[in-house]
Image (cartoon, rainbow, N blue to C red):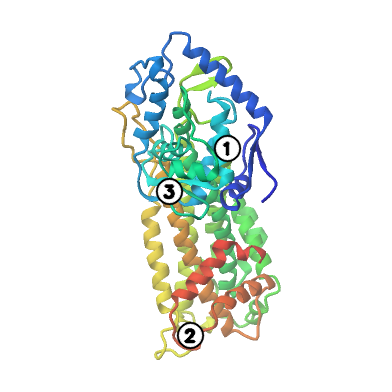
């Protein structure tokens, strides 16, 4: 990406976050944003001279907010804040998540409501463009007073401390990373450490990336479901638009329309239209519009919540007009609940896919013309038997992940911060759930492709046939038993890379 993204105070889009986080799109700070930042900074400097206490500017933090800090110690206060709050643990967050955090922090500060100097935002932009990625441990934020521990780890690198990588290089000290990027360390002034760590930027970054990845998963899941209809020699009668019109659920109608289009031109459906003794298909086929449609409506809700957060200022205190106002925009609940809901939706996408895998591999229905476990030689070969076990194991883990994180409160900071969102945990669970669901859908594509092979020379719809060809390009038909892990991983790779988007 060579066209820069200009931070001018306007909301970012999910696509903006993707392009900067994953495609290294350059970022620029607009003159209008610089003017807004400068005006807000003047308000903070005026407040510092009025002799009154102002939270986080000349006071301690959290339950220590009643402690006044002298002017000589204000710089030390801000650096100490980053050091003390950098207390996260665990493996580092993925690079794209951290880059998304950096972008969202810069965009929020650029809206001119935080009272930092322009150089703070310029430092963030410089590190993004130089490919400097701070080491940010995964666990530590409770998602209420901002994503404190993760953002503190990020902020330390701005000042020459902490740890970071430059491009794909090894992890080095923050000072070394800045030297490699040609960027001097940033000495913090009053309010600036607090502005760096007070925000929902971890939650929002993961939310934006998850929305994009969930869309890819959802598209692949519909393609797999359409392929399974023909693999099972099912009917398409339940996709009749009139059925879904009377239900009045928008996601359901959209899914039915998409499945109809995917199956358009199928030679398999009309091949058993007469003398087929079956009256109805199992729910995993017949109720796909209802189940996947509900998940699609949920995804739309999540995208709306995330999109709003991408235009937000989530700092505290805020500079509004000529006032410095303490409030609670750092609280993550507006995004934590949607992220919990996203994991539930993902769970259902995977769960109903696994049921279709079971139906195909069980060969319960003689009218499907499928062999048990889709094996080339039942008894001698086990075929895809254990692929269904793997899908079941993924779904079992998904059940645990779908329990919401946002409803289990644990107070912090001596009860001053007495109701937290735990949105970062909701995001982490949704990310793991998405990974598991990709494997389940990959297994369905593997099984459904084997089912289509049985019905040759008849063909499915043109879009389904394109997917079948892509699956077969990485996972040839079974002629005897072989290790299935490489096939499943290769098909999951098609989903993750978005290769199926053209189908």
The foreground one among 262 and 148 is 148
Q: In the drawing, does residue 26 fall left or right of residue 280? A: right
Q: Residue at x 52, y 16 (%)?
A: 45
Mark sitting earlier along the chain (3/2): 3
Residue 196, position in %: x, y? 47, 32
**Residue corresponding to mark 2:** 371
| In this view, 475 is above or below 168 | below
The foreground one among 298 and 88 is 88
Q: Residue at x 42, y 19 (%)?
A: 55
Can you see residue 480? yes
In terms of secondary structure, where does tag 3 sit?
strand
Residue 148, position in %: x, y? 40, 35
Can you see residue 221? no
Q: Residue at x 60, y 52 (%)?
A: 23
Q: Nearer the viewer, mark 1 or mark 2?
A: 1
Residue 73, position in %: x, y? 38, 19
| In this view, 457 is above or below 110 | below
> Which class describes the residues within 10 Å of circle 3: few (<14), some (14-19), or many (20+)?
some
Q: Which mark is residue 172?
A: 3
| In this view, 467 is above or below 312 | below
Q: Residue at x 33, y 30 (%)?
A: 418
**Residue corresponding to mark 1:** 308
Q: Nearer the viewer, mark 3 or mark 1?
A: 3
Q: Nearer the viewer, mark 3 or mark 2?
A: 3
Query: How far is disc 1 from disc 2 in space, using C-alphas?
Result: 50 Å
In terms of secondary structure, where does tag 2 sit?
loop
Residue 130, position in %: x, y? 57, 45
Quarter of the rendering containing residue 458: bottom right
Mark sitting earlier along the chain (1/2): 1
In terms of secondary structure, where does tag 1 sit?
helix
């Amino acid at each position: 990406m060579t066209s820069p993204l200009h931070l001018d105070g306007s909301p970012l889009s999910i696509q903006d976050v993707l392009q900067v986080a994953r495609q290294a799109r350059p970022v620029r700070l607009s003159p209008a944003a610089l003017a807004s930042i400068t005006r807000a900074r003047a308000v903070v400097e005026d407040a510092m001279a009025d002799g009154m206490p102002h939270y986080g500017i000349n006071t301690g933090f959290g339950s220590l907010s009643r402690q006044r800090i002298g002017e000589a110690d204000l710089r030390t206060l801000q650096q100490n804040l980053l050091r003390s709050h950098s207390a996260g643990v665990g493996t580092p967050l993925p690079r794209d998540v951290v880059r998304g955090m950096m972008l969202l922090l810069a965009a929020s500060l650029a809206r001119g409501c935080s009272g930092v100097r322009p150089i703070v935002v310029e430092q963030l932009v410089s590190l993004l463009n130089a490919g400097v990625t701070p080491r940010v441990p995964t666990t530590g934020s409770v998602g209420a007073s901002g994503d404190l521990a993760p953002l503190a780890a990020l902020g330390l690198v701005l000042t020459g401390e902490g740890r970071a990588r430059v491009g794909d290089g090894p992890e080095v000290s923050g000072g070394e990373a800045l030297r490699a990027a040609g960027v001097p360390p940033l000495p913090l002034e009053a309010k600036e450490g607090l502005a760096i760590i007070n925000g929902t930027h971890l939650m929002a970054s993961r939310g934006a990336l998850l929305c994009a990845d969930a869309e890819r998963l959802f598209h692949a899941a519909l393609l797999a479901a359409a392929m399974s209809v023909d693999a099972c020699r099912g009917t398409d009668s339940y996709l009749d638009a009139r059925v879904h019109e009377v239900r009045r659920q928008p996601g359901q109608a959209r899914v039915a329309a998409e499945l109809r289009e995917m199956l358009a031109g199928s030679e398999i459906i009309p091949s058993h239209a007469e003398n087929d003794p079956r009256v109805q298909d199992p729910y995993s086929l017949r109720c796909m519009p209802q189940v996947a449609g509900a998940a699609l409506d949920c995804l739309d809700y999540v995208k709306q919540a995330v999109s709003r957060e991408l235009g937000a200022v989530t700092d505290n205190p805020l500079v509004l007009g000529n006032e410095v106002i303490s409030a609670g925009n750092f609280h993550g609940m507006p995004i934590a609940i949607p992220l919990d809901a996203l994991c539930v939706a993902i769970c259902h996408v995977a769960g109903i896919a696994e049921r279709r895998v079971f139906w195909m591999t069980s060969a319960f229905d003689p009218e499907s013309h499928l062999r048990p476990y889709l094996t080339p030689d039942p008894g001698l070969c086990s075929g895809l038997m254990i692929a269904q076990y793997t899908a079941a194991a993924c779904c079992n883990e998904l059940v645990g992940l779908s329990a919401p994180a946002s409803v289990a409160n644990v107070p912090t900071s001596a009860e001053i911060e007495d109701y937290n969102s735990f949105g970062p945990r909701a995001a982490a669970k949704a990310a793991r759930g998405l990974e598991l669901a990709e494997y389940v859908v990959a297994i369905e594509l593997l099984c459904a492709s084997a089912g289509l092979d049985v019905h040759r020379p008849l063909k499915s719809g043109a879009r389904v046939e394109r997917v079948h060809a892509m699956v077969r390009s990485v996972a040839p038909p079974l002629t005897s038993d072989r290790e299935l892990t490489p096939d499943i991983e290769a098909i999951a790779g098609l989903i993750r890379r978005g290769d199926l988007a053209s189908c």
